[in-house]
Image (cartoon, helix red, strand yellow):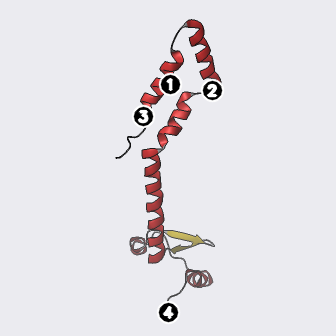
Amino acid sequence: MLKTREQITEELVASGKEIAPDDPAQREANRRVASIDGVHVYFTTEEETARDAEEATVAAEQADYVANHKYKDDRKSAYGDVGDQLDMMYHDLANDSTTWKDHIAQVKADNPKPAKES
């Protein structure tokens, strides 16, 4: 019968032993370690598989954000404060200049929307 992580941990704590994270054979078999009450217990194969799936999902979500949404955040910070933009607009009207329009065009050029897939 297979033991649960809790059972293994209880046995390790009771015996005073620890599965050392620097054990090369264990490190090769299972990369991740959980620290339970100060005792290092390696992930089971099932836990490794589940964690790999979680990491793949997070990586896919991050890639989607960078590819399709990050430009919005980049533009928002590059546009600057609304008060500064209004000041630019006022001075553009007063001086017959295009400072604000040029600024907005530059921000959009520096942070383009991703091309839509057909």
Reading the image, the residue beneath label 1 is: 104
Q: Within 10 Å of the Cα at label 3, are there few (<14), some (14-19), or many (20+) other Cα atoms?
A: few
Q: Nearer the viewer, residue 115 or 38?
A: 115
Residue at image coords 51%, 14%: 98
Q: Nearer the viewer, mark 2 or mark 4?
A: 2
- Give coordinates of residue 116: x percent, y percent: 38, 43
Q: Percent x, y for residue 102?
A: 48, 19
**Residue that sits furthest to the top in the current view:** 95
The percent position of residue 42, horizontal first and vertical second, equals 49, 74
Spatial CA span between label 1 and label 2: 12 Å
The amino acid type of the residue labelled 4 equals Met
* Labelled disc at residue 55: none
- Report the side of 73 relative to 28 (left or right): right
Identify the secondary structure beneath mark 2. Answer: helix
Q: Nearer the viewer, mark 4 or mark 1?
A: 1
Residue toward you, 115 or 22: 115
How crowded pointer 4 is (Cα within 10 Å; few <14, some 14-19, many 20+) is rated as: few
Please report the residue visible at 55 percent of the width from the left and 80 percent of the height from the top: 5
Residue beneath disc 3: 112
Distance of label 4 from label 1 (alpha carbons): 67 Å
Helix, strand or loop status at disc 3: loop
Residue type for callout 2 = Val
- Residue 72 in the image: above or below residue 45: above
Q: Tell me whether the residue at label 2 lies in contact with that at label 3, contact meaning CB atoms closer than 8 angstroms.
A: no
Instruction: Answer above or below: position of 90 versus 16.
Output: above
Image position of 72 with respect to 109: above or below: below
Q: Earlier in the sequence, mark 3 or mark 1?
A: 1
User: Which residue is disc 2 drawn over?
Assistant: 82
Q: Which mark is residue 1?
A: 4
Q: CA distance from mark 3 to mark 4?
A: 58 Å
**Element type at marker 4?**
loop
Which is nearer the N-term, disc 3 or disc 4? 4
